[in-house]
Structure formats: structure tokens, C-alpha cells
Image (cartoon, coloured by chain):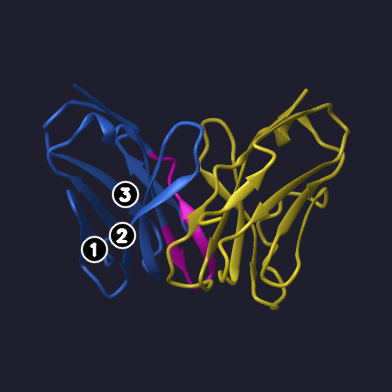
Chain colours: A yellow, B blue
Amino acid sequence: GAGVSQSPSNKVTEKGKDVELRCDPISGHTALYWYRQRLGQGLEFLIYFQGNSAPDKSGLPSDRFSAERTGESVSTLTIQRTQQEDSAVYLCASSLVAINQPQHFGDGTRLSIL
Amino acid sequence: KQEVTQIPAALSVPEGENLVLNCSFTDSAIYNLQWFRQDPGKGLTSLLLIQSSQREQTSGRLNASLDKSSGRSTLYIAASQPGDSATYLCAVESRYSTLTFGKGTMLLVSP
């Protein structure tokens, strides 16, 4: 597709379950980012990937959060043992390279933890 | 730690007015400043990117300025339209972090 694609668009799950969120970046974009947007808060950076370099995980809030990316393609964000405070919109973005390029965002996954 | 503040938090104007959204940041060692819009239930759309060496960027009815030394940027929207209604987000990219976002300005343009 032409833009960043995220799935699922909505996810409702029970507290304690694991969830996996998927992001398909724009073809040819070497950098991929995950952000979290909680109600009433600004976007929080979680993690970014640049090519084959080690990812920058400095924004991950706890060890329950992890992400993977294979090459320059799909990425998955996994949240283990979900808590109610994990409820948020998770946004993925990609850019040609990691610095000084506009980031293109998907529509996000709205995650609700019951 | 970089902090980004946007004022006002919300703004309501009648159609046709010119308006200014403000953004300030605490650490002037930035690569660039970016403005985005976000429509309800959607992701962000990139509007303008100003490199640290630039003073302003223009796209259609939008003009963004950057004063790096004072840590300020403004987004000017000319002749506002109802379709401009959205949340506008400012973000800065620096050597030590990827984008740091403000909380946004929610704009409502009424017909």
C-alpha cells in the first residue's frame, strides 16, 4: 500500500493477556517508530528501528513491552501481561531514514484493557 | 530532557479568520521542528518540517516559523476553513532523541 498500515485497528482484551500489534511501513523506509498516545497525553516515544542497527528501546515503559522488526519490513509490538494503564492508541510511523525526514504515521491501534 | 509546550490547548474561530498556534521547546539543540495535524481516530499527517538552519517553511495557507535560539515556533493558518478543524501537534527532533511531541492545540473552525 501507499501508506503505513497498522492492524488490528481496535483491540479489546482482558487484563493479564498478551497482545501483539502489527505495523507495515511504507516500502523503502528504513526507519520505523512506535509511539503511545494515552487519553489527554501527548505522544510518547517507545522504540525505533533504523535499518539493521540495534533498535533504540529507550522509551519502552517496562520489560513487558518488546518489539521486533525483520529487516526493513513489518514490525510487531508485543505487550505481555497487559495492565489497564496500557490502554492507549499505539501509533507506528516510518521515514526514509532516521534523521531529518518527515515521519509518516499509520492510523494506529486502539487498545482497551478491561 | 526536551520538553515541548503548545499554547493554546484549544482554539475556536469563525471561518475566514487568520490564526496562530504557538509551540515552545526547552533545548535549542535540535535537528528540526515538525508540525502535524491529527484528525479524530486517525494518525498524524505531516504538515511542515523546518530544519534547524531554516527560519520558516510554507505550504499553501500554512506558514511555520522557527526561532531556535528562543525555543519557539509558530504555525500561521491563513483564511481558516472548517476542514482545518483538527488537533495540531508540534514536535522537535534532536541529537539525543527522536521526536518529542507537545500535547497539541485542538482547533475548531466554525462555518
Q: Amino acid at mark 3?
A: Cys
- Mark 3 belongs to chain: B
Q: CA distance from mark 3 to mark 2?
A: 8 Å
What kind of element bears circle 3?
strand
Marks 3 and 2: CB-CB under 8 Å? no
Marks 1 and 2: CB-CB under 8 Å? yes
The answer to which of A102 and B6 lies nearer the viewer is: A102
The quadrant where residue A15 appears: top right
The quadrant where residue A82 appears: top right
The answer to which of B65 and A25 lies nearer the viewer is: A25
What kind of element bears circle 1?
strand
The residue indicated by pointer 3 is B23
Q: Which mark is residue B71?
A: 2
The residue that appears at 27% across and 46% down in the rendered structure is B22
Q: CA distance from mark 3 to mark 1?
A: 10 Å
Q: Amino acid at mark 1?
A: Asp
The residue that appears at 86% across and 40% down in the rendered structure is A18
- Mark 1 belongs to chain: B
Q: Which mark is residue B67?
A: 1
Residue A55 horizontal side relative to residue B96, left or right = right
Residue B17 drawn in magenta: no
To the question of a shared chain for discs 3 and 1, the answer is yes
What segment carries the magenta color? B92-104
Q: Position of residue B2 (x, y in %)?
A: 47, 58
The residue that appears at 69% across and 39% down in the rendered structure is A8
* Label 1 neighbour load within 10 Å: few <14, some 14-19, many 20+: some
Residue B12 horizontal side relative to residue A29, left or right = left
Can you say whether A27 is above or below A5 in the image?
below
